[in-house]
Amino acid sequence: MHSPDSHTHLEIPGLRMTKQRKEVYRVLVDGPQDHPTAAQILERVKCNQPGTSLATVYNCLEVLVEHNAIKQVNFDRESSRYCPNLREHGHFHDTNSGQIHDITFKPGIQLADILELPPGTSIEEYEITLRGKLKTSEQSS
Ligand SMILES: [Zn+2]
């Protein structure tokens, strides 16, 4: 029923995908994109590979981050979280539910359009984290 080796989209150029790396990556890419912590990723990996340790997960995550396959995101004093969305985006931290949502710029808008930057600035990296509350509607999950 489940064949992890058929996931050809889980190849990363220049990186040898061990079984564990592939599973950690798969969990992030194919699983719920809720910015899981390493501990949460471990829980998900364990469904397919019960013997996996947290140290292994951290190891895989580090390699994947190094190869720009995923992003490591840090919020305050919390544990690092991991995001497979490589498009430019920021994060909105819903303090009600603790959920983290990806936020993107409206089409055609660049950072330079909304910020006063020193002339000639070229932005190579940024982190945007917004914190607030989402209105909760009466929906059960
Ligand atoms: Zn994200």
Image (spheres, grey):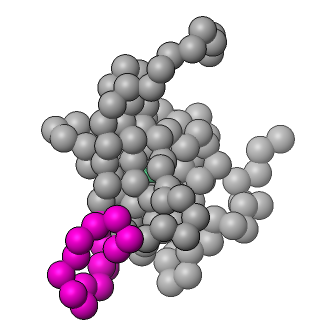
Residue 26 can be seen, yes or no: yes
Which residue lies at the image location 30% right of the left edge and 79% below the top edge? 123
Give the main secondary structure of the magenta stretch.
loop
Q: Which residues are magenta?
A: 112-126
Number of marks in the rendered image = 0
**Residue 10 image position (x, y, % from top left):** 63, 65
Asked if the stretch drawn in magenta spans residue 58, the answer is no
Residue 49 can be seen, yes or no: no
Q: Is residue 77 above or below residue 86?
A: above
Instruction: Using the rendered view, name the quadrant where residue 39 is placed.
Output: top left
Q: Is residue 92 left or right of residue 122?
A: right
Q: Residue furthest bottom?
A: 120
Which residue lies at the image location 41% right of the left edge and 21% below the top edge? 97
Quadrant where the image shows the C terminus: top right
Instruction: Using the rendered view, name the quadrant where residue 4 is placed.
Output: bottom right
Quadrant where the image shows the N terminus: top right
Q: Nearer the viewer, residue 13 or 85?
A: 85
Q: Nearer the viewer, residue 33 or 130?
A: 130
Q: Nearer the viewer, residue 140 or 71?
A: 140
Q: Is residue 1 left or right of residue 86?
A: right
**Residue 73 image position (x, y, % from top left):** 32, 52
Which residue lies at the image location 57% right of the left edge and 14% below the top edge? 137
Q: Is residue 106 above or below residue 33?
A: below
**Residue 68 image position (x, y, % from top left):** 43, 72
**Residue 60 image position (x, y, % from top left):** 40, 59
Q: Is residue 32 above or below residue 85?
A: above
Which residue lies at the image location 26% right of the left edge and 49% below the top edge? 74
